[in-house]
Image (tube, helix red, strand yellow):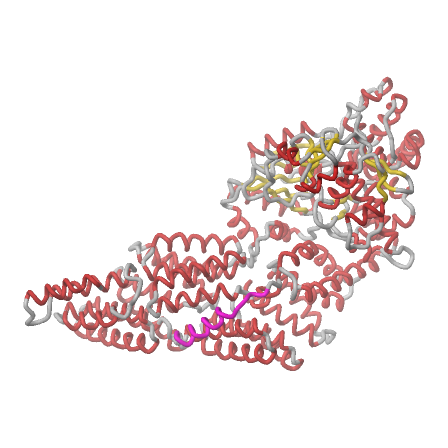
Amino acid sequence: MIGRSSMSRGGAFSFGPFRLYPAQQLLLEGDARIRLGSRALEILTALVERAGEVITKQTLMTRVWPDTLVTDGNLKVHIAALRRALGEGQPGRRYVVTVSGRGYRFVAPVEAFGPEGLQAQEGIEAESAHNLPASVIRIIGRAGVIDTLLRQLAKHRFMTVVGPGGIGKTTVAVAAAHMRVSVYEHGTWFVDLAPTGHPKLVARALASVLGLTTHSLDVTAALIAFLRDKQMLIVLDSCEHVIDEAAFLAEQIINAAPGVHVLATSREPLRARGERLQRLSPLETPADPSSLTAAEALAFPAIQLFVERAAESLEGFELKDADALVVAEICRTLDGIALAIELAATRVDAFGLRELSTLLEDRFRLLRHGRRTAMPRHQSLAAALDWSYELLPEGERTILRRLSVFAGSFTLQLASAIAANDRIPVPDVVDGVGSLVAKSLISADIGGAKVQYRLLDTTRAYARQKLVESGEIDAVLRRHAEHHRDLLERAGVEAESRSAAEWWADHARRVDDVRHALNWAFSPSGDEALGMSLTVAAIPLWTHLSLLEECRACVERALACGKAGVLGDLDDMKLHTALGTALLYVRGPVLQIDVAWGRALEIAERLSDSDYQLRVLWGLSLYRVYVGRYRAALAFARRFRAVAQKKDDTVARLSGDRLIATALHYLGRHTSARRRLDRMLGAYVAPAQSSHIARLQWDQRAVALGTLSVILWLQGFPNQAVDTARSALDEARATNHPLSVCNALGHAAFPIAMYVGDRVTAEQLVTMLLDHSASHGLRVWNAVGRCLRGALLIESGDGAGLSLLRLALDELRDARFGLRYASYCGVLAHGLGAGGRPDEARGTIEDALEWCGRNEERWSMPELLRIRGEIRRLEGSAMAIAAAEDDFRQALEMARRQEALSWELRVATSLARLWRLQGRSGEADDLLSAVYCRFGEGFGTVDLKAARALMLDCRVRGRPGESPEARCSLTQGTTSL
């Protein structure tokens, strides 16, 4: 053993069955990890380091919250959680005692070990990813149930824990999930459905927990696509009020995702296919308690739970033989319902056991007499809640009622904002929350960076009814809505300077409360003006969470209410901007977008709001890229850059260069486009703040690299194109931004793989695109993926690619998505011609060329003209051959004007092949050699290999009048090409 000061060097402590490793933030009971937050562990470490000494409250608060002013209410919550985690109240377990008026003392024997003590925890398996609530409450009387549940879950994959309110369904489910966190490769994810106010939001709640950004109207389909190949446990908690949708979702997951297991909790079965039930019975109580000793009584889980909770409430409480009968009767009166037992046990300090028993017996007899139709267990819980509530001081009753407006978890700061007023100041709210936690009316999760509090759904419903009866519900709901509006307005400003991860951690969980607040604001008793301002403030939240369909619906509701003239210009501008963005990614480039963004731009220019001018001009340019109107896209991109230049916004200015380059590229001006991209990439540093991608919708560097890769290939640098496309994909995936990943796959990595002839890689990439777009609900990008899969099949000689490509093109046309549409039509025309369907091939290629002419989409014109020439050549007539040669010459000239060397090589190869068949091998060789020799790399790619083989063939055939020796010399000379 060593001195306790060695802990700073990484030692360990041992007490009772526990081992504490402060440097690793780890507490073990045996080999089981006890999950506590960093502050709770810091408190435990401070107490253990000075075991036997009194540590004052101020000393602990200064150590745990060095830079934050807190009250001792915060400390009380963590001390209570520590006592529960350590199992105080069980025989022989007494660790932390309160020294009245002074602080706390750790009273158990402690051994301290040096760094070698760490060896004992090397074998502890690291936890997999999960979001389970901290399991700091010792599970009593449920070990057999949990063991059975886990065995059945492994066998059947879909289990529902069923039982009445307050019996402990969530506690059992979370405990079981904690025991299996290391089993599932892709994590264990807890979805609290209690705050979900509408059945349609069930799938969305799961998507949000999984961090799945989906733009699809069919969120369930996107979820299924995402989960199909995952190994995961999903816990759906509190399903009873959304039971039909929860059942449907669980059934779909079980049917389509063989590696995913579902554990649900509900007051009634979901009645879904594949479901197995685990009914939860009340905690066992003695049938005949008349002769029980204390030791015998503690063998019953209900009594054990009562004693543990009483010990937390009353310092030094122990069950004595004389009290065993009293406690047993209390637990029987409460029908073994865990929540009711906990509520009663917390009042031992106020009444003592015998008076508590009398009060409960009288109260429950009265309540049961008046509620003949209620089930006994429900009577017990309702009575326990009534009794506990009426014993609260008036201030705590008021706090509990007001906190019932929260849909889910909340912090002390949020609790204070809603529950405090002139009569109940903030310090009283903090102390009140601590007291309500101690009385089991509020639960505290201290496992994260900030303590999160919540009311159990049963308690929340009870307290909400009391809030209605108090007559202050509308006033509290108004305060709740106003606070969330103010909170999100501040969050919107913070988004400009904070990382996405930090912003998400602080604000993502507020979405359920925003939904509830908006529902109230737009109700008959609400306030539409407040609802509109809250909608505006919530736009960044919806955007960050990719809840764009929800954003669209809420924004349209706010705009409809705002027609009466109560909507100011600033809010009007923000709402129309958000509407255009949401529509683009939910519905595709529909005409309504132009109207929305046009209105937003008009207001932004009138208000001289350069930030929103940038947002809207960006959207207007991107919209025109999507519909294939590149000249108009260029005009808006230049306006965007001019505003950025005037604003002196370097990031926006460089992003404008990228947008201009994109339009120039599709207009066939590749050299100018590359110049801008090189300048942009050389100077661009992506800002760290979370608003960057949300505002411009893409990771700018990744998209710039993607466009550059295509330009490099066009200009005759195939190897550099492959490397750049790979970098674009790597950077896009690193951002975890769905649209950026789709762009890198569909418009860079896959096309480049096809251009160079790497079909194996192309197959991998298109599969990735299809899976990614499906899992994120990106319908248009999924259609793009099917276009590319069809193109790959056509290139491989598989006729199935024709129908696949045609159907996907129809879907893109219906969605008005014109980006690269003509080039996909060219591939279809090529496949139709090669498949012996010349009439369809001619019609398709003419449509593609007409599209390009109408929209000035010149980048693919050389290739489309070449394809038309090949289709005409296959006809075989002299007129068709002549027309084909005209197409090739026109394509050759256009490729040269664009400085698109790779298109030039393809066209030269087609023309040379035609001339060779006409006996003009020398002209064919001269043409092809002149293009081929301008390449300095990529000689193993498919086009260069085909050109080289054709040149060799032309030289072997020879020119008219050449000697065999000359032809041989030419043939040998090509070996260095």
The percent coordinates of residue 151 (x first, y second) are 59, 30
Rendered-image quadrant of the C terminus: bottom left
Rendered-image quadrant of the N terminus: top right
Residue 324 falls left or right of residue 777:
right
Range of magenta residues: 670-687
The picture quadrant where one finds residue 954 is: bottom left
The picture quadrant where one finds residue 140 is: top right
Q: Is residue 645 above or below residue 248?
A: below
Residue visible at 23% across and 68% down in the picture: 910
The percent coordinates of residue 170 (x first, y second) are 70, 39
Frontmost residue, 540 versus 8:
8
Q: Count numbered badges in the picture.
A: 0
Frontmost residue, 172 versus 808:
172
Residue visible at 90% across and 50% down in the picture: 395
Q: Is residue 153 above or below residue 768?
A: above
Q: Main secondary structure of the magenta part?
A: helix
Find the residue positioned furthest to the top.
291
Instruction: Indicate yes or no whether the magenta region holds residue 8.
Output: no
